Image: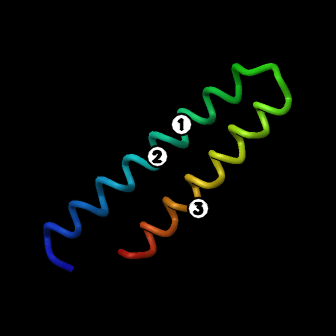
């Protein structure tokens, strides 16, 4: 993997961590059960994407 490719993967990892944190924060603030479940599902998807990017390393 080139240095430039590694930087792209590191950038993607950072974005996925940010999205996970945003989803967690939002889910903790939402009272509507359906929306809370949706944001938790989105958090799980971002966790899976993070793991996919991490596995590239």
Residue at 39% in and 76% down? 56
Within the image, what quadrant is residue 31 found in? Answer: top right
Tell me: residue 47, above or below residue 31. Answer: below
Distance (Cα) linking label 1 and label 3: 14 Å
Cβ atoms at labels 1 and 3 below 8 Å apart: no
Cβ atoms at labels 2 and 1 below 8 Å apart: yes
Return the residue at label 3. Answer: 48
Tell me: residue 13, above or below residue 5. Answer: above
Which element carries disc 3, helix, strand or loop? helix
Q: Residues within 10 Å of mark 1 (few under 14, many from 20)?
A: some
Q: Residues within 10 Å of mark 2 (few under 14, many from 20)?
A: some
Cβ atoms at labels 2 and 3 below 8 Å apart: no
Return the residue at label 1. Answer: 21
Residue 5 as seen in the image, left or right of residue 56: left
Which element carries disc 1, helix, strand or loop? helix
User: Please, which residue is most extreme toward the right here?
Assistant: 33
Q: Residues within 10 Å of mark 3 (few under 14, many from 20)?
A: few
Which element carries disc 2, helix, strand or loop? helix
Residue at 49% in and 59% down? 50
Q: Earlier in the sequence, mark 1 or mark 3?
A: 1
Within the image, what quadrant is residue 29 found in? Answer: top right
Q: Quadrant of the C terminus?
A: bottom left
Distance (Cα) linking label 2 and label 1: 6 Å
Residue 32 as seen in the image, left or right of residue 13: right
Within the image, what quadrant is residue 54 found in? Answer: bottom left
User: Please, which residue is most extreme toward the bottom here?
Assistant: 1
Residue 16: percent from left, percent from top: 45, 49
Return the residue at label 2. Answer: 17
The colouring scheme, among rainbow, by chain, secondary structure or one colour, is: rainbow
Residue 51: percent from left, percent from top: 52, 65
């Amino acid at each position: 993997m080139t240095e430039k490719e590694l930087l792209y993967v590191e950038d993607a990892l950072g974005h996925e961590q940010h999205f996970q944190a945003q989803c967690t924060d939002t889910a903790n603030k939402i009272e509507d059960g359906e929306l809370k479940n949706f944001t938790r599902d989105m958090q799980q998807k971002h966790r899976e994407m993070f793991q996919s990017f991490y596995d590239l390393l």
